[in-house]
């Protein structure tokens, strides 16, 4: 199972962020899809089985927290990492309540991001 | 004062009664003093005698009429006077020697008659002692013959109740008896007297044997009559007839004389009887009128007492604050004014459903051991309708319903025998559905207060007590309402500024009032003597009071003023109290401590600003973080590129570090502004908060070179809000930084002791004055310039800490620095103290 390439979806309406994440993950053996429209992103989840989703919070037309809520309803086992520019305990707690696997605050160091992804994916394997 | 008035009346009445009795005695059982007058005229001459006699008050014209008699007192005073003037102790004895011839003749006839048949004066003395003859003295007393011999007689004279035997009087009587023998042709008898008791005098009379000559004369007279009859009517009568004729002759003569005498005595007696009767009738009428008057006077007196008691009772009732003292005072009042011996009060105990013995009150003037030791053991109260056995130690076993029936059946007027000599009067205190009790008043049988008026009085007092109870409960309710208002309320008179009412909050926590002062001490005192208000408040009070006297109610606008008293901000306004008729003009002042509100008002503004800033900061954070992310990702890529030289890699890494530090600043800023929002409590790691707060403090403008020593051990999470904790620590750290003027060492240390967390914050700043230490947590207390601080910081620190049941302690040394100890108790954290 270790050798199977994991597929990850990154949702953020800011292309700059998508670009940055792309840069940070380009050397890793992940199959990463990027999408800048959360509604579109949700459709993609329905069509393709992703192992992990990375989502921003502040997006248009729907907020990341809503994306999280909807996806978790449909795919309770799907690990979702929230990335955000906001430092907000309340939001963080809410996200954790809804079942997000991690909560990363932008800007994220490359190592932090990769560690977080690996950790979650490894946990998912064992579970 | 009713008592003095009453005494006066009483004394006046006594005098009247004495005069009245004297007059009655004088006329009713007097003595004829004509022999005394005659004696005095003979001894002293007419003029002197008249002068002497009239000096005693009664005119001679009255006294010399033998139908007018004087009192025994008057008579004996006159006898004393006779002895004094004539300087002859035997003068009263000698008075009999001037007996009027007519009287003397009566005695001679009697004596003669007696002598003829019995040849002994004894019969004369016996006649004198008999009721009809010696009437002058018989009016005053009673003669009894004790023993008698042939030539002596021993008798006593017992004077009636109310008179006393006097020596001179006895001497006068002795005189009459001594001279009496002379009228029978004997020499005066030897007499003596002895007063054996107040009312008893014993007389001894010894007369000499009959004179031979006297006997011979009568014998010759007898012979002449017999012989003349014998010689003149010799042939007609026998000797037997002569004796009979003699007998008949004397008999007829003496009978005629006796009848004459008897008629005279009868005449006098009948006359006196009629006269005395009419006088007595007149007197009894006067007496009746007088009694009526007394009755009326008594009624007026009762009425006065009634009114006095009622007015006193009303005073007690209208000035009452509590009910029990009223009961005490009422019973005291009634005991004092109506001469009750004792009073007991019983109160209905709702829990026990029975009347419970409440108190006893004794009249101290009439101490009666019997009643003092009396308690309700084996006492039966009874009348025709009910019988209650009160034999339960201290309680009356009467159920409420029974007593209610009892009250309806017989309202108040129940006289029940408790002991042989005492009566009980009931006074009921019955306030429907809230209170029931009754007084028992004990009195002696003879009460000078009539039952009728007692009944009326008790009913009225009972009504008044109902009103009293209602008043007190109303006042109590009103006072309770006023006292419970969470504002400072004070009511005062507009004329003299005397305090009429002050509520509890005022007494317990108004900053200007002395601590531990009693409410009762404050009422009636002058307002400004107790509360030293600022000038602006005083001016407003005077203005308002002035306006009240000038303006109409409609013109009044309720105005709210604000003042500062001892670092507290107060908001106050006045209110008018509508008055009834001529009641005193009262004004109320209501004050509220709005320091907190003021503070929060300011704080809200500050918070709003910060929140706004926070929102902007968050927006900025988002806007900055995104490009920063791009910068970071790019810099990382450069740094990882194997094809670049070391110098370029170093630059890239520097960029990465700066990006991270910028992003951290933004994180801290936006995180702080968000925590200002209202938060739910949750488990917060204080170490974390301390770290974050320290970071923020670094951005403050006066932070220059501060060595921060952190000594943080693992401590349990505490249930609070992060925002509030941040506020606490940022404030304390900021203070420390300010105290050190930006240079020094700040030590922060956490300790985890049994059940409590201690956070020590130590600076090496200027320290706090000892005098100022107690005030540093007060609102608006500050030693800083206005620009530097508002004096709110430490107040809010303390407020937040106490909200979570924590403590903050401070110790400081001038020039060395200050240490704050913040203590949280873990088991108390859950409960919010709001």
Image (cartoon, rainbow, N blue to C red):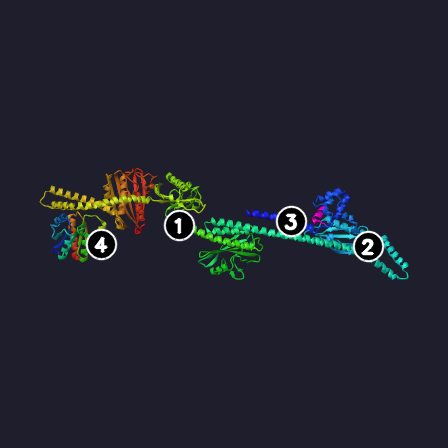
User: Which residue in the structure is indicated by mark 1?
Assistant: B481
In the picture, measured across the screen, residue B658 lies left or right of residue B324, that is left
- Image coordinates of residue B756 in percent, x first then y, are 30, 49
What's the distance in space between the residues labelled 3 and 2, CA to CA? 48 Å
Which chain is disc 4 placed on? A
Q: Mark 3 or mark 1: which comes first in sequence?
A: 3
- Which of label 4 and label 1 is nearer to you? 1
Q: Mark 1 or mark 2: which comes first in sequence?
A: 2
| Residues behind callouts 3 and 2 on a single chain | yes
What's the distance in space between the residues labelled 4 and 1, CA to CA? 50 Å
In the image, residue B772 sits, relative to residue B292, either above or below, namely above
What's the distance in space between the residues labelled 2 and 4, CA to CA? 157 Å
User: Which residue in the structure is indicated by mark 2?
Assistant: B112
Magenta stretch encompasses residue B582: no
Q: Quadrant of residue B432?
A: bottom left
Q: Quadrant of residue B648?
A: top left
Between B661 and B316, the residue placed more toward the observer is: B316
| Residues behind callouts 2 and 4 on a single chain | no
Q: Mark 3 or mark 2: which comes first in sequence?
A: 3
Q: Are marks 3 and 4 in contact (CB under 8 Å)?
A: no
The answer to whether one can see residue B190 in this image is no
Which chain is disc 3 placed on? B
For disc 3, the neighbor class at 10 Å (few under 14, some 14 to 19, many from 20) is few
User: Which residue in the structure is indicated by mark 4?
Assistant: A97
Q: Which residues are magenta?
A: B68-78
User: Which residue in the structure is indicated by mark 3?
Assistant: B18
Q: Are marks 2 and 4 in contact (CB under 8 Å)?
A: no
Helix, strand or loop status at disc 2: helix
What's the distance in space between the residues labelled 3 and 1, CA to CA? 65 Å
């Amino acid at each position: 199972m270790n050798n199977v390439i994991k597929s990850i979806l990154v949702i953020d309406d800011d292309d700059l962020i998508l670009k940055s994440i792309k840069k940070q993950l380009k050397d890793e053996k992940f199959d990463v899809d990027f999408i800048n429209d959360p509604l579109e992103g949700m459709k993609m989840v329905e069509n393709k089985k992703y192992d992990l989703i990375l989502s921003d919070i502040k997006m248009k037309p729907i907020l990341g927290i809503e994306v999280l809520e909807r996806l978790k309803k449909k795919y309770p086992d799907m690990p979702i990492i929230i990335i955000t520019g906001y430092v907000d305990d309340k939001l963080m707690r809410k996200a954790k309540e809804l079942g997000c696997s991690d909560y990363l605050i932008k800007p994220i160091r490359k190592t932090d991001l990769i560690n977080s992804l690996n950790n979650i994916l490894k946990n998912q394997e064992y579970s | 004062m009713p008592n003095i008035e009453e005494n006066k009346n009483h004394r006046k009445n006594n005098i009247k009664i004495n005069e009245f009795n004297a007059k009655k005695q004088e006329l009713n059982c007097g003595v004829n003093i004509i022999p005394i007058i005659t004696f005095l005229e003979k001894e002293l001459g007419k003029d002197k005698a008249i002068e002497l006699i009239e000096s005693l008050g009664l005119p001679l014209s009255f006294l010399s009429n033998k139908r007018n008699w004087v009192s025994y007192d008057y008579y004996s005073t006159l006898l004393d006077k006779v002895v004094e003037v004539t300087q002859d102790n035997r003068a009263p004895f000698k008075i009999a020697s001037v007996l009027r011839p007519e009287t003397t003749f009566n005695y001679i006839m009697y004596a003669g008659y007696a002598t003829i048949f019995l040849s002994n004066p004894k019969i004369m003395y016996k006649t004198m002692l008999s009721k009809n003859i010696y009437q002058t003295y018989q009016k005053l007393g009673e003669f009894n013959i004790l023993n008698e011999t042939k030539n002596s007689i021993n008798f006593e004279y017992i004077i009636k109740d109310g008179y006393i035997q006097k020596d001179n009087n006895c001497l006068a009587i002795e005189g009459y008896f001594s001279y009496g023998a002379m009228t029978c042709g004997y020499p005066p008898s030897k007499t003596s007297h002895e007063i054996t008791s107040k009312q008893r005098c014993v007389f001894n009379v010894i007369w000499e044997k009959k004179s031979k000559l006297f006997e011979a004369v009568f014998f010759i007279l007898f012979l002449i009559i017999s012989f003349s009859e014998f010689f003149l009517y010799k042939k007609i009568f026998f000797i037997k007839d002569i004796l009979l004729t003699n007998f008949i002759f004397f008999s007829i003569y003496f009978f005629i004389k006796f009848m004459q005498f008897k008629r005279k005595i009868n005449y006098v007696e009948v006359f006196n009887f009629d006269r005395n009767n009419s006088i007595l009738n007149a007197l009894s009428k006067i007496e009746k009128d007088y009694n009526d008057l007394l009755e009326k006077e008594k009624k007026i007196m009762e009425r006065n007492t009634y009114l006095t008691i009622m007015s006193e009772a009303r005073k007690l009732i209208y000035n009452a604050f509590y009910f029990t003292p009223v009961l005490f005072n009422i019973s005291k009042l009634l005991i004092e004014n109506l001469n009750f011996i004792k009073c007991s009060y019983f109160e209905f105990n709702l829990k026990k459903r029975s009347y419970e013995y409440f108190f006893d009150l004794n009249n101290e003037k009439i101490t009666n051991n019997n009643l003092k030791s009396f308690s309700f053991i084996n006492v039966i109260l009874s009348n025709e309708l009910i019988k209650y056995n009160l034999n339960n130690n201290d309680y009356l076993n009467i159920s409420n319903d029974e007593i209610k029936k009892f009250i309806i059946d017989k309202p108040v007027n129940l006289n029940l025998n408790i002991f042989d000599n005492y009566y009980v009067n009931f006074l009921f205190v019955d306030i429907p559905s809230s209170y029931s009790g009754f007084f028992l008043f004990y009195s002696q049988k003879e009460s000078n207060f009539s039952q009728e008026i007692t009944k009326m009085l008790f009913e009225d007092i009972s009504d008044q007590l109902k009103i009293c109870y209602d008043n007190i409960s109303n006042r109590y309710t009103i006072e309770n309402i006023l006292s419970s208002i969470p504002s400072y309320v004070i009511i005062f008179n507009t004329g003299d500024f005397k305090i009429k009412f002050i509520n509890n909050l005022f007494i317990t926590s108004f900053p200007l009032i002395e601590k531990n002062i009693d409410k009762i001490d404050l009422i009636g005192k002058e307002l400004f003597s107790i509360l030293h208000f600022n000038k602006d408040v005083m001016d407003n009070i005077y203005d308002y009071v002035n306006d009240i006297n000038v303006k109409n109610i409609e013109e009044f606008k309720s105005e709210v003023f604000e003042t500062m008293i001892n670092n507290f901000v107060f908001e106050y306004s006045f209110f008018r109290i509508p008055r009834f008729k001529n009641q005193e003009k009262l004004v109320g002042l209501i004050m509220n401590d709005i320091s907190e509100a003021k503070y929060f008002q300011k704080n809200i503004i500050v918070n709003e600003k910060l929140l706004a800033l926070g929102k902007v900061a968050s927006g900025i954070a988002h806007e900055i973080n995104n490009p920063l992310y791009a910068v970071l990702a790019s810099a990382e890529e450069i740094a990882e590129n194997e094809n670049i030289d070391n110098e370029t890699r170093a630059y890239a890494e520097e960029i990465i570090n700066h990006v991270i530090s910028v992003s951290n600043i933004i994180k801290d800023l936006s995180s702080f502004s968000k925590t200002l929002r209202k938060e739910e409590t949750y488990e917060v790691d204080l170490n974390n908060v301390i770290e974050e707060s320290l970071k923020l403090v670094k951005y403050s403008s006066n932070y220059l070179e501060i060595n921060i020593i952190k000594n943080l051990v693992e401590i349990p999470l505490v249930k609070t809000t992060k925002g509030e904790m941040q506020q606490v620590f940022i404030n304390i750290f900021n203070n420390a930084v300010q105290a050190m003027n930006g240079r020094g060492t700040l030590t922060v240390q956490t300790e985890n002791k049994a059940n409590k967390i201690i956070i020590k914050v130590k600076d090496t700043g200027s320290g706090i004055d000892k005098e100022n230490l107690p005030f540093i947590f007060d609102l608006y207390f500050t030693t800083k310039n206005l620009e530097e601080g508002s004096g709110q910081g430490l107040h809010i620190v303390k407020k937040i800490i106490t909200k979570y049941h924590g403590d903050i302690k401070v110790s400081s040394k001038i020039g060395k620095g200050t240490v704050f100890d913040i203590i949280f108790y873990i088991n108390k954290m859950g409960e919010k103290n709001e």
